[in-house]
Amino acid sequence: MDMVNVDFEWFDPQPAVDFHGLKTLLRQLLDVDHQLFNLSELADLILSQPLLGSTVKVDGNESDPYAFLTVLNLTTHKDKQVIKDLTAYLSQKASSNPSLSALGSLLQPTSNAQVGLILTERFVNMPHETVPPMYTMLLEEISWALAEKEPYNFTHYLILSKAYTEIASSLPTPNQPPSKKKKSGGSGGEEVFYFHPEDEVLQKYAMCSANYEYTTPRDEGASDSKRAFQELGVKPMGHLILVEGSRFEAAVNGVKDFLGGGQ
């Protein structure tokens, strides 16, 4: 096996060069529901706060990001259309899942909560060790921002992520006929896997966490298209983790211990 040595570098978001790379990663993060949101507006909003959050690159500051992490204040930006759309989307997912009832109340217009929405995504072949430094730097940047009286005194952090279950293939094989599709009720007791392994740690510190079904219907055979190297198909879904502000630093330390690579 050939080994390739790659040097990863962490940067502040760069408004001049990161727009298209961020849109690509946001599209991946939101999966089939990405079309429900103005990703250009969302990318611009992330880039409007270049001193908060980070990107990971391999070819210098002028190259596209391979990973990013940021936090957006849902209250401060409540009048921006993409935040209105995201808040309505998250509220709908919370209201339809009893496990997320605490989140639903925090997202109400009458709530006094300051919810920081954490958006983070990376290419699938990125080493997990690149994640802890992004969270560590976010903690430091929030501390600096608070010293400058900026609006990042979050009562809660909401991590928007992805999970998946494995489902039987609908394609025929030489030894068996195609399986009959079952309607997904989301409560079949399937084992859930995480695209971001740190989510398994983060939810241990959470007030609540749960998976949710995407709003946009998925094409027939989409799960089979993701089974090139395995017997079972993959069914992605959204995943939400709500962490109280007072527990966020401990959650970040838990991620560092779990994945390594922390600074």
Image (cartoon, grey):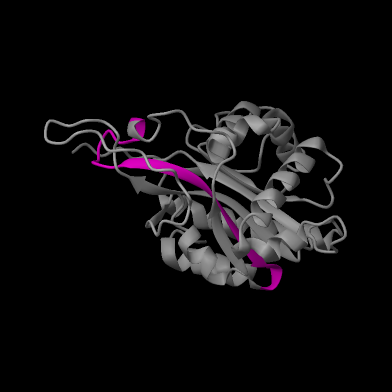
Query: Is 99 located above or below residue 122 in the figure?
Result: below
Q: Which residues are magenta?
A: 225-246
Q: Position of residue 242 (x, y in %)?
A: 63, 62
| Number of numbered markers | 0
Q: Residue furthest left?
A: 175
Q: Is residue 71 visible?
A: no
Asked whether residue 140 is drawn in magenta, I would say: no
Pick the front one: 93 or 139 = 93
Where on the picture, by quarter, is residue 125?
top left
Q: Position of residue 11 (x, y in %)?
A: 60, 42
Using residue 88 as the reference point, say whether residue 172 is left or right of it: left
Asked whether residue 228 is drawn in magenta, I would say: yes
Name the residue located 50 percent from the left edge and 53 percent from the top edge. Answer: 131
Which quadrant would the N terminus be assigned to in this image? top left
Pick the front one: 185 or 5 = 185
Q: Is residue 28 visible?
A: yes
Where on the picture, by quarter, is residue 2?
top left
Q: Position of residue 115 (x, y in %)?
A: 75, 58
Name the residue located 61 percent from the left edge and 55 percent from the top edge. Answer: 159
Query: Is 94 located above or below residue 246 in the figure?
Result: above
Name the residue located 25 percent from the left edge and 37 percent from the top edge. Answer: 229
Q: Position of residue 162 (x, y in %)?
A: 51, 48
Query: Is 173 located above or below residue 132 in the figure?
Result: above
Where on the picture, by quarter, is residue 232?
top left
Pick the front one: 94 or 144 = 94
